[in-house]
Amino acid sequence: MIPLAAVVAVRAGWRSSNRRFWIPVPLFLVWLLALPFVVLALPIFVIACPASRVDPFRALQVLWQLLCALRKTHVSVEHREASILVHIF
Amino acid sequence: MSDNRRQVLDMLAAGQITVAEADRLIGAIEDGPPAAAATALAERRAAAPRYLRVIANVADEDEGPIKVNVRVPLQLLRAGVRLASLIPPQAQDEINTALRQHGVGLDLSQIKPENLDELIDHLGDLTVDVDGEPNLKVQVFCE
């Protein structure tokens, strides 16, 4: 299943006493918004893939797997001036 | 088909185990008592690494500490390798040539999900610690 939500946390400074701002990202809304564009682009994709000798169905399958595999990805970078955390649920 | 055998095949399909491991587990199911096979399956599932962790710490007195903590699901790496296998042969040749020109003797056509599974299996027992520049520490491991 593709990730449906993510969270981005931003903090000014690395000290734990500094306030961290949590920004929830509802990815399901992003997918919903992107769906019409994906549907529009699908015929172009299906035509372009054979032109570049790529199986379009396999390409779609791999792209779907890639999206699904993004779940539970966690990236955190802390610096003196700022820190950022991204977690995909 | 028994539940244990179906579980093994499901794990293989999901890319959690390699073909060799699936073969060994199915062999254990056929040869050993059902309880022993189920135990082996549960142990293998619990021990299988799921994430690649990269932790980097820089203790710079001027810039302050920099900490990087990345956890990447191994499924993402597998999907990335599958995506790389979609690159058309002509483009692969161009990429290989460009890599060779930069001193990287890597053949993209030889990178397959099965190879990655082997690599992941070995990474499970391995921790890479890099103490390069002063105050820099990098750890790479699977969990």
Image (cartoon, coloured by chain):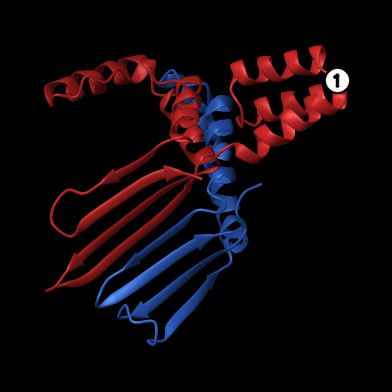
Chain colours: A blue, B red
Would you identify the image quadrant in which residue A20 lies? bottom left
- Decide: is B138 above or below B85: below
Residue A50 percent across, percent down from the top left: 47, 20
Tag 1: amino acid: Pro
Compared to residue B41, the image places residue B110 above or below, namely above
Circle 1 residue: B33
Element type at mark 1: loop
Q: Residue drawn 56% across and 60% down?
A: A30
Asked where in the image residue B92 lies, by quadrant, the reply is: top left
* Residue appearing at x 52%, y 21% in the figure: A55
Residue toward you, A77 or B139: B139
Q: Position of residue B28 (x, y in %)?
A: 75, 17
The chain ID associated with circle 1 is: B
Quarter containing the N terminus of chain B: top right
Residue B37 vs residue A44: left or right? right
Q: Circle 1: is it few (<14), some (14-19), or many (20+) Cα within 10 Å?
A: few
Residue B2 as seen in the image, left or right of residue A47: right
Question: Between residues B46 and A67, which one lies in front from this camera angle?
Answer: B46
* Residue found at x 47% / y 31%: B120
x and y percentages locating residue B99 in the rendered image: 20, 24
Q: Residue at x 20, y 66 (%)?
A: B59
* Image coordinates for residue B20, horizontal then vertical, percent: 60, 16
